Amino acid sequence: MKRYHVTTFGCQMNEHDSERMKGMLDSLGYAEAPGRDQADLILFNTCSIREKADSRFVAHLGEAKRVKRERPEVIVGVGGCWAQSVKEEVFARFPFVDVAFGPGQVHKLAEFLVSDSLTAQGYFEFEGFTGHLPAKRAHGHHAWVQISVGCNCVCSYCIVPSTRGREVSRPAGELIAEVQGLAADGVREVTLLGQNVNSYGRDLPREQRTTFAELLRAVDAVDGIDRIRYTSPHPKDMREDVIRAHAELPALCEHIHLPLQSGSSPVLKRMRRTYTRERYLDRVAMIREHVPDCALTTDIIVGFPGETEAEFEQTVEVVEEVGYDGAFTFIYSPRRGTEAADLPDQVPHEIKVQRMQRLVEVVQRRAHDRASRFVGRTLDVLVEGPSRTDPSRLRGRSRHNKVVNFTGLGGPGELVDVEILEATSQTLSGQESILSRAAG
Ligand code: 5AD
Ligand code: SF4
């Protein structure tokens, strides 16, 4: 039996795509290898969002080159966003690569493997949903559901529209059938995935048109699904119906990831985000009004071209004001083919690093303040497995998407009550409430 090894970089969409890649390979009769040295097929699912993502992957690729020198019959494949962004150039730069494919061409990998092709092949059309392929899920209780692919935004810093193409939604009926199948399989939590989830459905034919809020309702109605998450929404498309859904639908979690990118309206304009600082803060106010305890997380870029000290300060102010439960902060990284890469006034690296340090300090302080509100409360925690730092304890996630390390007896996939005793900016710590277990 032939064996494969897949390394995944980048976002949750890539994790999803890798699960589908593995599912497809299993259905072709392959099995998963524990490491690259045991594999007949070495695959990389790549990311290109920032320069660091590129360079991390290139280091791993060196490993594949070594394996291929020792065992020339091994097939090396490169999929995902980096592959899409360089296309055929991949073969000139890395002659030991046998097959390369973009995010919309995962199914072509199967075609390549069953053909007798002796020459390297590249597949870079935007045509398929990986969501149609069989999946090999990493966790029994959790599943990704790809609701759309591609992105119609033109954010000036972002490579994704060029790597994942125009937005295409999957029909709601098909998605609900998929979620029903997952629930029957024991899945309790689903994460709906799209590059811009809340513009879901606008491209569907009139008779199939469904809004994102309607889709959430239909998923909530599926028996056995206790938790629904989604990522990522765009602030410009964050409507009241979706926010209300968080208050009304029992399974929809109290957590919204709402990427800010910058707290300065002029910077947002140069980023082509199509909202202002005020409009963003209005959305936050609406969330707080309808779902007061909602956790809010965000993405922020520092050092966007032309970002002045005063503009950066505006971002810090928004972080202070909103009080995020967590934030991913990134140093701006010019990406090939994007508008911002050619803007004048690129910010020097030392200034970017200094700003990042200042921002992280505020993000962590505010996240810690926010996490403190959970101390003394009992939270509903979905058990994932042993704690990473102390295997005698358990690790799980609250509905607010906080990692909770705790002492208790729950098994993976179980929902348990945990009394929270301590909080840091990143994690919560507590003990399973035995009373509820005895009663339940
Ligand atoms: N440089 C730095 N960060 C970026 N992101 C996207 N493109 C870039 C870039 N060129 C960040 C954004 C986005 C997250 C996934 O990555 O914050 O929301
Ligand atoms: Fe995901 Fe963007 Fe990286 Fe592609 S480039 S894998 S969409 S984070």
Image (cartoon, rainbow, N blue to C red):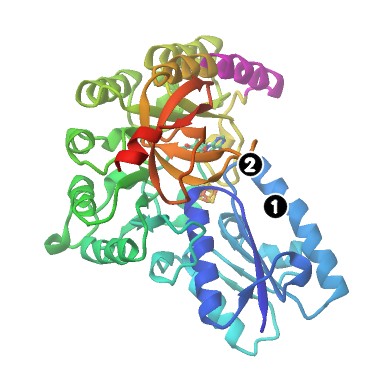
Q: Quadrant of the C terminus?
A: top left
Secondary element at tag 2: loop
Residue drawn where x is 51% and y is 19% of the image: 363
Residue 267 among those drawn in magenta = no
In the depicted structure, whether residue 304 falls above or below residue 200: above
Q: Amino acid at mark 1?
A: Phe
Secondary structure state at the residue bearing disc 1: helix
> Which quadrant is home to the N terminus?
bottom right
Q: Main secondary structure of the magenta part?
A: helix
Residue type indicated by callout 2: Pro
Q: Is residue 264 left or right of residue 64?
A: left
Which span of residues is magenta-colored? 347-362
Residue that badge 1 annotates: 57
Q: Residue at x 56, y 17 (%)?
A: 359
Please, is residue 351 above or below residue 98 in the view?
above
Residue extending farthest to the left is 207
The vertical placement of 150 against 111, above or below, is: above
Residue 154, percent across and down?
41, 42
